[in-house]
Amino acid sequence: MNKNDSIELLIEDISADGSGVGKLDGMAFFVKDALTGDLVSAKITKLKKNYGYARLMEILQPSPHRVEPECALHRQCGGCQLQALSYDKQLEYKVRKVRGALERIGGFAPEEIVMEPVAGMTRGYRYRNKAQFPVGTDKNGCPAAGFYAARTHSIVPVDDCFLGVEQNREIMEKTLAWMRQYGIEPYDEKTGRGLVRHVLIRAGFRTGQLMVCIVINGNKLPQAEALIKQLEQIKGMQSISISINRQRNNVIMGDEVRTLWGTDYIEDFIRDMKFQISPLSFYQVNPAQTEVLYDTVLEYAGLNGDEVVWDLYCGIGTISLFLARKARQVYGVEIVPGAVEDARKNAQANQIRNAEFFMGDAEEVLPQFYEQEQPDNSQHPQVIVVDPPRKGCRESLLETIVRVRPERVVYVSCDPATLARDLKYLCGQGYELKRVKVVDVFCQTVHTESVVWIQRKHI
Ligand code: SAH
């Protein structure tokens, strides 16, 4: 077997990043855009010792699980790796992915892993309340928004993304027309020149409020009044701001935000609680599934009203406030200053008086609280909820958790690999795995969200 050889493969699985996997002569081949059940012809692009990569040339026999994708650009864009796979199979894939990580990386035996039924959506499109469109130039050099074509610095224009709200289209059309009219330069990744880098759009699904934040490589937005005049006409527009990002990196938002028009935040409801959300604050992207996710967290926390609970990586305090209604005292910890501010305001707005928020690194705040303040037994935490970014928790935090001995830990995770790693640590230190639930928050994509309950063993 050599590079550039054409091979025929029956795709038997989908990898963690969404490539089809087929076997030939004991070698596993990864083929982008191929799905379980496809018989394909593919060309070998890279060979390693016992696996390789191949480019899809032709689908000789399509998988019975193929469906018609809604978006014509889904293959080029790469954001929706699973759009051509039936939704049932997408859900199966995600459950298998989480279970697989727990077995392989976490070292759990299959019978130790109790997976609850996966929570899917009835329609896995138009579910996102947030979009971040990169702005650059299309292949003709005109300002455009969409996604970067593979291996290039040019943008493939997208006038509508089927995961997002319909208002995105009008906001982007108006913004691009304004750029063209006033000669506002898009940012150029390659040279670091130009002004407009990204457009962040957020929509409150329940309130109908819209937020637009223009991320710029500069201090000031020229002709801002003209843009505002266009955007303020859109129904629901509530907040227009700029975020200043002059760094040459691929981080989207800059640390500084200036409101140009309207309020500094938008508001939205989760169940009966109202939340304010600022541009730099994290907010769950799929409102319908957020409710399922948070219900599961509450169920796994098993509160009776008398507990001290920590919500680490709490964002704008959403989980914290739901916990607070069922506990004696909740402490939330969050590293982004604007988000902590939102969290405190949100507690007030919902008349929650037993939630306190700390700004800082969870890995520092928790040990400091339990070491320096010498709390008495009344501060002993019964439950600790963690919802870290993809990289998971640092081991020093897990050590602290083990030391303060909560009865339960509820782990919300968007990365099964780091989840499995962290659970392996905790379950090696006196905890046991009770339940795992996958909630499909990122439909059409390979990304998974899961909630896990682990319990302290009494020996
Ligand atoms: N639980 C929240 C937010 C989860 S996202 C919700 O459901 O909305 C993860 C959050 O962790 C983000 O708000 C991020 O800013 C914050 N974060 C990242 N690293 C952190 C750290 N080391 N300490 C505390 N918070 C951190």
Image (cartoon, rainbow, N blue to C red):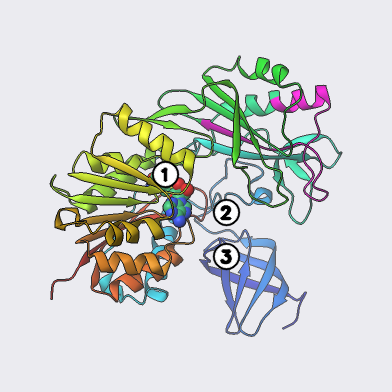
**Which is more N-terminal, label 3 or label 2?**
3
Q: In the image, residue 298 lies at what x, y percent?
A: 24, 47
Let me know if residue 201 is in the magenta part.
Answer: yes
Which residue occupies the foreground of this view, 50 or 250?
A: 250
Q: Which mark is residue 315?
A: 1
Q: Which residue is mark 3?
A: 20
Disc number lying in front (1 or 2)? 1
The one nearer the camera, 257 or 123, is 257
Mark 2: which amino acid?
A: Gln
Quarter of the image where one finds residue 357? top left
Q: Which residue is mark 2?
A: 81
**Quadrant of the frame with the C terminus:** bottom left
How many other residues sit within 10 Å of disc 3, few (<14), some (14-19) or many (≥20)?
Answer: many
Give SS at disc 2: loop
Taking the spot 48% from the left edge, 23% from the top edge, the residue there is 209
State the SS at label 1: loop
Q: Residues within 10 Å of mark 2 (few under 14, many from 20)?
A: many
Contact between marks 3 and 1 (CB within 8 A): the answer is no
The quarter of the picture where residue 436 lies is bottom left
**Is residue 197 magenta-colored?**
yes
Which amino acid, mark 1?
Gly
Instruction: For marks 1 and 2, give the CA distance.
Output: 28 Å
**Is label 1 within 8 A of ligand 1 (CB to nearest ligand atom)?**
yes
Taking the spot 31% from the left edge, 29% from the top edge, the residue there is 348
